Every structure is written in structure tokens, then in C-alpha cells.
Image (cartoon, grey):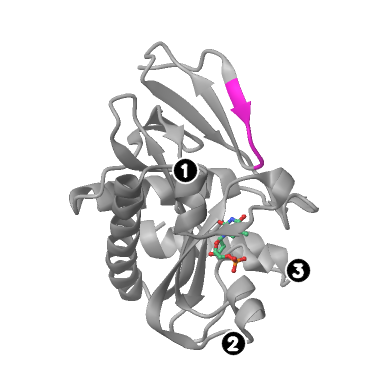
Amino acid sequence: MLTKKEQLYEGKAKKVFSTEDPEKYIVSYKDDATAFNGLKKGTILGKGAINNRVSNFLMRMLETKGIPTHYVEELNPRETVVRKVSIVPLEVIVRNIAAGSLSKRLGLPEGVKMKKTVLEYCYKNDELGDPMVNEYHILAMEFCTKEELDLIAEYSLKINEILSAYLKQCNIELIDFKLEFGKTSDGQIILADEISPETCRFWDSNTNEKLDKDRFRRDLGGVEDAYKEILRRLLGE
Ligand code: TMP
């Protein structure tokens, strides 16, 4: 079994460690929570373990449907072995229903169904506040190639279809979510980072109750319970 060697990176929600295998990392999920590019800080008890387990569960499912991911092996509730990638510096946002920054930008009330799935790209750069970019910026800045971007878009839309259908069976509406992709040392584009209540908007299909990080961002209370509810509905615990 691989073990953690050197800490390579500490982000807002996870730490990344090297291992005995140069092609594998271990990620360790924290309970620390931030929002608005780190301006709001807090702790969500048990969130690290829930995000790790939910993300691994969803990535394993996506793998069975033909989406390559960085997932290798869950070591314990908080830690997972993943494939080493260099991250494409993009946050890919997929939107089915208007909410959050899209509602603000376009003046659409939250909850309005989009007539077509919306794909957005943001440049992953905390100092700049993750600005939205389009395909021209991405290619001009050489964040990835045109072929890689086309593949990222294709995977993102397919992931949306798979996850939306699956979550509906759990009485969860997938409003929007954020993905990150990475490149392996042999040049393959694979899904990386996490898919969890941290990076998705999940609403109860019947009541529209928010079951995700918006409860923390907007001080709605019941944050831990919402994360636990997602774990229960997805993994039956
Ligand atoms: P937004 O409406 O605030 O742009 O968020 C869109 C989706 O992306 C939402 O599901 C939350 C997720 N997201 C992240 O995962 N990380 C971020 O830093 C931001 C701003 C949003």
C-alpha cells in the first residue's frame, strides 16, 4: 500500500502528498471551508471525509461509463490515492438550472431551467479571482490545446448526463457543478479534483432545499446535516 511521503501542496480544502510511486499522489481532505475566494472561512465538521467518499463514489461510477478519472484507491475515509496529473488551469462549470453567479450576471431568478446546458470556463487563479475566459483566451494563453479543450467539453457534457440521471434517482436535482481536468505524464486528459457538495449545487427534487455548500456560503445553517444527507442518499449511509 502506498504511503504519504512529502507534502507537495496545501489548498483550501485538500492537501496533496507524494508517494513511493512517482505517478501517484495521495490527497487528504480537510474539514476547512472557505468561500468567496477565501474571504469567508470556517470549519464543516466531517466534511473532508464526506467529500472524499462522495467524490470517489461518483468517480468510480463515471469510470464504469467511460470517463477516465484520477481515482485509484480509497485509503481511508479522508485519503485517496490518485493518478498524478498536471492540472489544466481551468474550472469548467456546467449549468442546468440558473443559480449563483449566472443568476447575478444574467438577471435570471435562481431555479429557472436553462433551455440548453451552459458550459463556462474560468481561469484557475486565486490572485485574479478565477476570471471567466472563453475558448479564444484559453488557446491564446495556451492553457491547453484545441483538441484537449474539445475533449474536456465532451467529457463535461457526458458527465452532466450521467450524474444528472443518477442523482434524480436519489431525489437530487443537479443544478450546476464545477470540474477540473488534468494531464497525465503520457498526455492523457482525465477528470481530476473532486465532485462533491463542495463543487456542485444539489437541490432536493421535491422541496428545492439546498443540500450543498451554499448553506455555508449563505449562512443558511444545517451545513453538516446537508453534507450527511448527500452521503446517505448516494451511499446509503
Ligand atoms: P457560481 O454560480 O458561484 O459560479 O458556481 C457555479 C458552480 O461551481 C457551483 O456548483 C459551485 C461551484 N464552484 C466551485 O466548485 N468552486 C468555486 O470556487 C466556485 C466559485 C464555484
User: Marks 1 and 2, Cα distance to the nearest angstrom?
Assistant: 29 Å
Where is mark 3, residue-wise? 219
- Which comes sooner in the sequence, label 1 or label 3? 1
Q: Is 9 within the magenta? A: yes
Q: Which residues are magenta?
A: 8-12
Where is mark 2, residue-wise? 108
User: Marks 2 and 3, Cα distance to the nearest angstrom?
Assistant: 22 Å
Seen at 43% across and 82% down, the residue is 205
Disc 1 residue lies near ligand 1 with CB under 8 A? no
Instruction: Name the disc covering residue 193, or none.
Output: 1
x then y, percent, for residue 50: 51, 49
Seen at 24% across and 47% down, the residue is 63
x then y, percent, for residue 23: 36, 20
Q: Nearer the viewer, residue 54 or 222?
A: 54
Relative to 35, is 169 on the left or the right? left
Relative to 95, is 186 on the left or the right? left
Which secondary structure, mark 3? loop
Image quarter where ligand 1 lies: bottom right
**Quarter that holds the N terminus:** top left
Q: Nearer the viewer, mark 1 or mark 2?
A: 2
Relative to 154, is 223 on the left or the right? right
Q: Nearer the viewer, residue 94 or 231?
A: 94
Where residue 74 sits, quadrant-wise, is top left
